[in-house]
Amino acid sequence: MPKHQRRSSPRSTSKLRVQTSYSRVTTKDTTKMQSKGIGVAAKVVDDLERLLVKACNPADAQPMKKYMRNQFEYFGVKTPKRKEIMKQVFHTMTDPSSGEVLSVAKLLWTRDQRELHYCAVDILIKYKSLLASNAQICAQSANVVRHLLTEKSWWDTVDLLASNVVGHMASTQPSHMKPLLDKWITTDNMWLRRTAILHQLKYKGNTDEMTLFRYCMKCSDEDEFFIRKAIGWALREYHKTNPGAVRDFVAEHKNRLAPLSVKEALKHD
């Protein structure tokens, strides 16, 4: 993967604060705000890189890389330590704007080490309510999340974004997200289809059953392992809330559902 040049950190930006009250916002003002957002993102990313390098463990890096089929580089920082580091960084992120949060995530995604991608996911999950605070911000956030789902894609980041970030955005701003997810379920990109299937994983009693079943049937004829597994996983989670509905669905469509999907769906039957 090509390495991206690191942006310079501003000399005096320790907190994520953006002035939101303007009597008149000019083009010059907007440019300044965008520049500040980029500078803040660079500061956060530099801090994360510094802390992760300090905590790196080459002995763990190789097994972590191998587990992900050698697709990504690793510092060798496991989840508990990364969570400690994130707490330190979150302490400096005071009242960030949605634009700053998205800028941080995008910049982290340009780095090679997978732990920095995990940090981007951690940040988006932390501020998921901010990212869906209104329709306009939700639309901007969805564009960025789509980029993260389709670049440097693998199940480790896709599933967290699907069930935590996209799921929250869909429940908070359904008028924007439902039509978007209807597009994703028919797209050529497998990871977007998987995201559409999995986005309701945490909905429990609020699951839109018709949408869940419709998405499963849209992809039921696929040979792709990650889609078959996603169908089974989504149905298995809904089975915990409404086992009868899942049993009936599987019984009706068993001839079209892959054996893996059926096995996963009825795992706790």
Image (cartoon, rainbow, N blue to C red):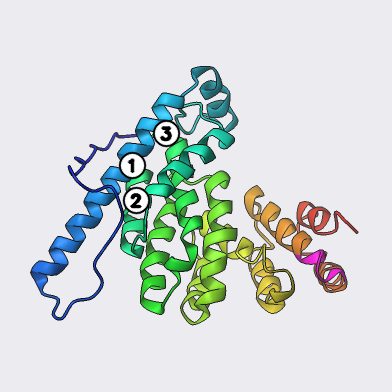
Q: Which image quadrant: the N terminus?
A: top left
Say few, some or many: other residues with alpha carbon within 10 Å of mark 3 (under 14 / 14 to 19 / 20 or more): some
CB atoms of marks 2 and 1 within 8 Å: yes
**Residue on which the image places disc 1:** 45
Residue, x 27% and y 45% (percent of image)? 42
- The type of residue carrying mark 2 is Val
Residue 174 located within the stretch drawn in magenta: no
Mark seen at residue 104: 2
Q: Earlier in the sequence, mark 2 or mark 1?
A: 1
Numbered disc 2: secondary structure: helix
Q: Which image quadrant: the C terminus?
A: bottom right
CB atoms of marks 3 and 2 within 8 Å: no
Residue, x 37% and y 56% (percent of image)? 94
Q: On screen, 169 above or below 2?
A: below
Magenta region, residue range? 238-243
Q: On screen, 160 above or below 19?
A: above
